[in-house]
Amino acid sequence: MQARKIRYDVIGLTETGRHRTCDSRGVGGVGVLVNTNLVMNIDSFEQLTTRIGRLRLRRCGSIPALIIFVAYAPTSSYGKEEIEAFYMNLEKFHKENHTFYKHLRDSVRSAEGSRATKRRQSYEIHELIRQRGAAKAAGNYQLTSELAKRCRVAIKEHLK
């Protein structure tokens, strides 16, 4: 399995599928892969919708309690109603948990509407962060440094 070659604590999985059909309630398109060092800290994983999952980790020693949302948004080929429903659900679950969340990567870069327009800059920032992580994992430190500089510039521009 490729995950053994990657150093990670938690990996969010999106668009997961099964070889056979499954009629069970709560089976959806997201999941998590948790490092064996953190398995004892898992409190729960809930499939909130077919596109949103929530992993709760207990506090253990110096590691604080943590809630991680795993989500994948509908692409711009979906209707505005489905895109809006996704963000409404995400916002609802966020408010229920009184927690902060960060969009790491999202597939709605070209979606229409004011909600997508407001987030478009942060998608670019998070894409730079993702690319920087991939470059660092590949050992390409020159590219990592360049992407870090571009990321800092993009964040400063976004905060203006």
Image (spheres, rainbow, N blue to C red):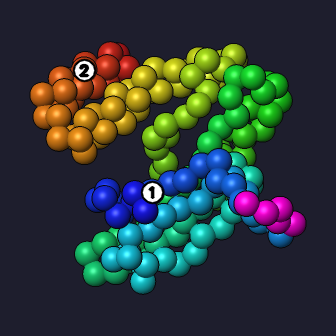
Left or right, 52 with respect to 80, comes to left
Q: Identify residue for label 2.
A: 150
Q: In the image, what residue occupies the spot 41% across and 29% down?
A: 127
Residue 154: horizontal and vertical position, in percent? 31, 20
Please identify the quadrant where the C terminus is shown.
top left
Magenta span has 103? no
Q: In the image, what residue occupies the spot 68% across and 28% down?
A: 75
Q: What range of the chain is rendered magenta?
A: 19-23
Task: Report which quarter residue 129 is drawn in.
Answer: top left
Residue 49: horizontal and vertical position, in percent? 74, 54
Task: Report which quarter residue 153 is drawn in.
Answer: top left
Please identify the quadrant where the N terminus is shown.
bottom left
Q: Is residue 93 visible?
A: no
- The disc, 2 or 1, on the residue closer to the chain's N-terminal end is 1
Q: Main secondary structure of the magenta part?
A: loop
Q: Is residue 59 above or below residue 148?
A: below
Q: In the image, what residue occupies the spot 25% across and 45% down?
A: 137
| In the image, farthest residue toward the right | 23
**Which disc, if any, is residue 11?**
1
Instruction: Please name the amino acid that badge 1 sits on.
Output: Ile
Work out whether residue 48 or residue 14 is closer to the camera in this orientation and state it. 14
